[in-house]
């Protein structure tokens, strides 16, 4: 017919629709990518809505619905209140007309109208004005959302064009207006686009609904995108709803081939020329205009009304989308006298215009569905599209045509269309309900972790308590806490040490045997051979004899390995537990700590016990010349590299410090040397209750379940053996409170010791994506989702951070004491460090350094990680001891 020929350009064939669909797919990619987003016509805005409804949402909300053809205020009750059957939603709403001039006035005036309408609604429905009401806001314009309750308006569209809001946060504007109106307490929890709200509304009844579509005054769609493709939001796991703002498709010329002269005229006469090109071909606000322009042109060229053109027909807005169905009345209303043919022709025009609209929507919708299908590597996609908008709802043929074309374009997918039954506010309330739950979860997690936060004041207190107990220990006053054990090491190494020594190292994660050879000349000439042996738990906690027999057996193996069974080597013994020493080669074990509890050892000389075990073996001989705490070994080992090293620190399975103390300060002194290294055994700080103010119930639980309850309280707040257990206690509590792992306390979570230090270190690594955190938790038997992993990581962070700060406060006390001992205003000093926590944890060392710096501002403290462990230090001490023996021997001979 004549009309068909006239409107040829508006009839789109399937290959053209496929071309449009492909173009739109490219536009989506562009909008999602961080590099091209700024220039993209299709904005692809992240919405911070991460899941469709799951049935757990509840609460009562106020709702505002602004931006469609009607402005509404509502009250929405989700699964709450008396009248609703379980699982339902109850809504009350009122439409408030917006005076025309407000749509193109000042933004603040529009928002004042909105908030006054809200107040009117509250009064009319007798809603308590005193109480605080959570509010869900549907705002149907493109907004950049940094969070769920912020929205920076990018531009107005449709019939809204207000001054002073572009680039501003509309939630703030709303809050401002609510404050100006006064007399209400409202908490704006969330802001969503109408597409998102529609998807959620329909998702309430249909779990498969993952697309929201509006064909109303404007047009737009949203869908659930894989978060890994949403560059603008951190995270790589799970989904996020993306508001495509597809109305802007074509704003950069991508649709030029398909644009007719009528589209160009509609655009030119619009509120926003050059913008929302696709929307202007599709949505209700423009379809009537398109029909009018076509009819006008046809009349002008004589194809209609015998060439007669009325004034009304020339006037913008005289044909609306609503009219398009009823041709004769509208034409007569325009001062025209249509013939039967005219009516049929005009009817045909409007069919073509709306058919093109549904075709374009079908093309872009199929692009979205194809993308989802690819994201999920599916062969067939089964999905539901939630739809709303006056065009879709009132235009008789529209839905059928749209469905048909979508199914033709995607023959292998099952697409269901669901009409939103109750507008967008139901969905908006569901989003708010999730936000409310997350906020309350957030609050409870924060409250749980709060006691782990150390204020500067608390850290200063810890420093001064440490200092006081160091002093008390030196004066032998407070044997119950810090023991301050003399080590009988008087000097750090001077580089003249020579010879081959065996070093045995018990007390850390493993037992190690080493052979160290100090050669003449440069330090680099130290030779080191070693072997690592695990100590089984039964042996750590069996009899003393079994333990030392095991050590002798390891030594025997090592000597075999080195081929030195008969060498009768001098040996140093690193024994990382508190020993009372009276000489360098004797040490009485005062008490076991950490994971050891072998019987008949406490109160005995450990050097003797080792000698006895070697004798029992009757296989090789060893000359044990020194027994050394690991802190002392570490200090010596590091001092070999750096003469300023006068402190040794262990932050590993346990924690402890030694340092060079002035002999005049040592009660139990026995030499005329100027200084002696003191093994502080600072892990005992707090054993008299002095740390009770910072000890949390989780710490108390860990202490109670430990091998040595009531002992080593400072160590239990700070060292590798306990941090994981503290974390586990916190996770248990959060889970019992329903804040984690969906409230399921699993066997894994009940297993003591599952969180080894190495896992903590991995979980907290910044380089690790959340997905990897999840897989670590999976390995540990903990089935977590993405939110769970975030919380677990936070718990680990809180616990390890506190540990590092406390150790930092302790170090500050030690270095300040050394500085004061020496009467210095400034002290440069190096701390030699070892231990898995210090070396492997991603943040521990940094936080420790920072804290020490702040709390000991007059000291310039460097930290030097020990390279070969404390064994080398033990060997150095042995070398010095042997040298002395020799000297004494020589003297004796003369
Ligand atoms: C309504 C929503 O149901 O649909 C509105 O509640 C939305 O927020 C509208 O904008 C879209 O349709 P229309 O035709 O009113 O623009
Ligand atoms: C090692 C020492 O290097 O560090 C051990 O040689 C010490 O004696 C250990 O106990 C501390 O680290 P961890 O992490 O094994 O307890
Ligand atoms: C316009 C708005 C968009 C909205 C759509 C439907 O395109 O920019 O945000 O979703 O209209 O109301
Ligand atoms: C424990 C021990 C101590 C050791 C520390 C580090 O605190 O009691 O002697 O130095 O662990 O291993």
Image (tube, rainbow, N blue to C red):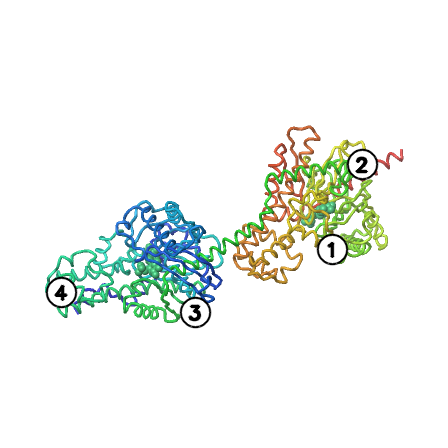
Q: CA distance from mark 4 to mark 2?
A: 117 Å
Q: Quadrant of ligand 3?
A: bottom left
Q: Which residue is mark 2?
A: 668
**Which disc number belongs to residue 498?**
none
Q: Residue at label 1?
A: 535
Q: Evaluate if marks 4 and 3 touch, with contact meaning CB atoms under 8 Å apart.
A: no
Location of residue 876 (image quadrant): top right
Where residue 385 appears, x then y in whole percent?
38, 65
**SS of the residue at dot 3?**
loop
Of the residues under marks 4 and 2, which one precedes in the sequence?
4
Mark 1 to mark 3: distance in Å? Answer: 54 Å
- N-terminal of the pair, mark 1 or mark 2, is 1
Q: Nearer the viewer, residue 112 or 733?
A: 112
Specify few, some or many for label 2: CA neighbours under 10 Å numbering under 14, 14-19, or 20 or more: some
Q: Residues within 10 Å of mark 3 (few under 14, many from 20)?
A: few
Q: Which residue is mark 4?
A: 304
Q: Which residue is mark 3?
A: 379
| Spatial CA span between label 1 and label 2 | 34 Å
User: Mark 4 or mark 3: which comes first in sequence?
Assistant: 4
- Asked if one can make out residue 885 in the rendered structure from this viewpoint, the answer is yes
Q: Are marks 1 and 2 in contact (CB under 8 Å)?
A: no
Q: Position of residue 689 (x, y in %)?
A: 70, 44
View extreme (right): residue: 893
């Amino acid at each position: 017919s004549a009309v068909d020929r006239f409107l040829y350009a508006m009839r789109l064939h399937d290959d053209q629709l496929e071309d449009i669909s492909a173009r739109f797919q490219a536009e989506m990619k562009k909008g999602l990518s961080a590099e091209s987003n700024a220039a993209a016509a299709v904005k692809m805005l992240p919405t911070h809505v991460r899941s469709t409804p799951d049935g757990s949402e509840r609460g009562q909300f106020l709702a505002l619905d602004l931006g469609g053809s009607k402005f509404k205020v509502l009250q929405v009750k989700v699964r709450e209140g008396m009248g609703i059957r379980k699982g339902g939603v109850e809504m009350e709403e009122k439409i408030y007309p917006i005076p025309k001039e407000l749509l193109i006035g000042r933004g603040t005036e529009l928002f004042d109208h909105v908030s006054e309408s809200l107040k009117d609604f509250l009064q009319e429905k007798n809603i308590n004005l005193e109480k605080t009401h959570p509010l869900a806001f549907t705002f149907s314009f493109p907004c950049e959302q940094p969070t769920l309750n912020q929205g920076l308006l990018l531009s107005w569209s449709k019939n809204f064009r207000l001054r002073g809001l572009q680039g501003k946060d509309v939630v703030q504007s709303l809050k401002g207006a609510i404050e100006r109106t006064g007399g209400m307490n409202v908490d704006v929890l969330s802001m969503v686009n109408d597409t998102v709200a529609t998807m959620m509304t329909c998702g309430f009844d249909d779990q498969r609904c993952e697309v929201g579509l509006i064909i109303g005054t404007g047009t737009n769609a949203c869908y659930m995108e894989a978060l890994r493709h949403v560059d603008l939001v951190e995270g790589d796991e799970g989904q996020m709803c993306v508001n495509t703002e597809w109305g802007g498709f074509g704003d950069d010329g991508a649709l030029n081939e398909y644009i007719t002269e009528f589209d160009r005229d509609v655009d030119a006469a619009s509120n926003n020329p050059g913008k929302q090109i696709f929307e202007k071909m599709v949505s209700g606000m423009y379809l009537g205009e398109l029909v009018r322009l076509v009819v006008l042109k046809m009349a002008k060229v004589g194809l209609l009304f015998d060439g007669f053109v009325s004034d009304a027909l020339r006037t913008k807005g005289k044909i609306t989308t609503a009219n398009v169905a009823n041709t004769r009345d509208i034409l007569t209303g325009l001062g025209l006298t249509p013939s039967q043919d005219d009516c049929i022709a005009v009817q045909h025009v409007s069919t073509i215009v709306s058919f093109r609209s549904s075709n374009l929507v079908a093309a872009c919708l199929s692009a979205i569905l194809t993308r989802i299908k690819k994201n999920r590597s599916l062969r067939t996609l089964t999905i539901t599209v939630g739809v709303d908008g006056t065009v879709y709802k009132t235009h008789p043929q529209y839905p059928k045509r749209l469905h048909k074309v979508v199914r033709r374009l995607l023959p292998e997918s099952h697409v269901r269309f669901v009409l939103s039954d109750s507008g967008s506010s139901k969905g908006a309330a569901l989003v708010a309900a999730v936000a409310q739950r997350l906020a309350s979860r957030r609050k409870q997690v924060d409250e749980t972790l709060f006691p782990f936060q150390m204020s500067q004041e608390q850290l200063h207190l810890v420093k001064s308590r440490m200092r006081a107990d160091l002093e008390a220990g030196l004066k032998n006053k407070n044997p119950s806490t810090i023991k301050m054990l003399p080590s009988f090491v008087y000097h750090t190494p001077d580089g003249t040490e020579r010879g081959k020594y065996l070093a045995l190292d018990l007390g850390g994660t493993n037992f190690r045997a080493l052979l160290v050879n100090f050669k003449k000349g440069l330090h680099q000439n130290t030779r080191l051979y070693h072997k690592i042996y695990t100590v089984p738990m039964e042996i750590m906690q069996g009899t003393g004899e079994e333990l030392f027999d095991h050590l002798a057996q390891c030594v025997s193996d090592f000597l075999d390995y080195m081929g030195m069974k008969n060498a009768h080597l001098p040996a140093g013994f690193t024994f990382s537990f508190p020993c009372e020493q009276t000489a360098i080669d004797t040490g009485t074990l005062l008490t076991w700590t950490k994971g050891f509890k072998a019987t008949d050892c406490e109160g005995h000389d450990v050097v003797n016990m080792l000698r006895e075990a070697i004798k029992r073996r009757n296989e090789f001989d060893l000359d044990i010349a020194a027994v050394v705490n690991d802190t002392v070994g570490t200090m010596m080992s590091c001092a070999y590299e750096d003469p300023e090293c006068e402190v040794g620190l262990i932050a590993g399975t346990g924690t402890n410090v030694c340092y060079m103390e002035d002999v005049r300060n040592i009660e139990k002194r026995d030499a005329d040397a100027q200084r002696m290294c003191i093994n502080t055994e600072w892990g005992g700080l707090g054993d008299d209750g002095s740390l009770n103010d910072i000890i949390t119930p989780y710490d108390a639980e860990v202490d109670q379940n430990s091998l040595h309850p009531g002992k080593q309280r400072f160590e239990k707040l700070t060292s590798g053996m306990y941090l994981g257990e503290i974390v586990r206690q916190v996770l248990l509590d959060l889970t019992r409170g329903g804040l984690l792992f969906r409230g399921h306390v699993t066997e894994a979570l009940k297993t003591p010791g599952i969180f080894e230090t190495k896992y903590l270190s991995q979980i907290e690594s910044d380089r690790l994506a959340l997905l990897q955190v999840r897989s670590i938790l999976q390995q540990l038997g903990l089935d977590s989702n993405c939110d769970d992993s975030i919380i677990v990581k936070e718990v680990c962070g809180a616990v390890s951070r506190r540990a590092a700060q406390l150790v930092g406060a302790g170090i500050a006390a030690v270095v300040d004491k050394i500085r004061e001992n020496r009467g210095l205003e400034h002290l440069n000093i190096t701390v030699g460090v070892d231990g898995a926590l210090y070396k492997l944890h991603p943040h521990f060392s940094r936080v420790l350094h920072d804290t020490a710096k702040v709390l000991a501002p007059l000291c310039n403290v460097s930290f030097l990680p020990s390279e070969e462990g404390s064994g080398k230090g033990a060997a150095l001490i042995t070398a010095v001891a042997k040298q002395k023996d020799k000297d004494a021997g020589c003297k004796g001979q003369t």
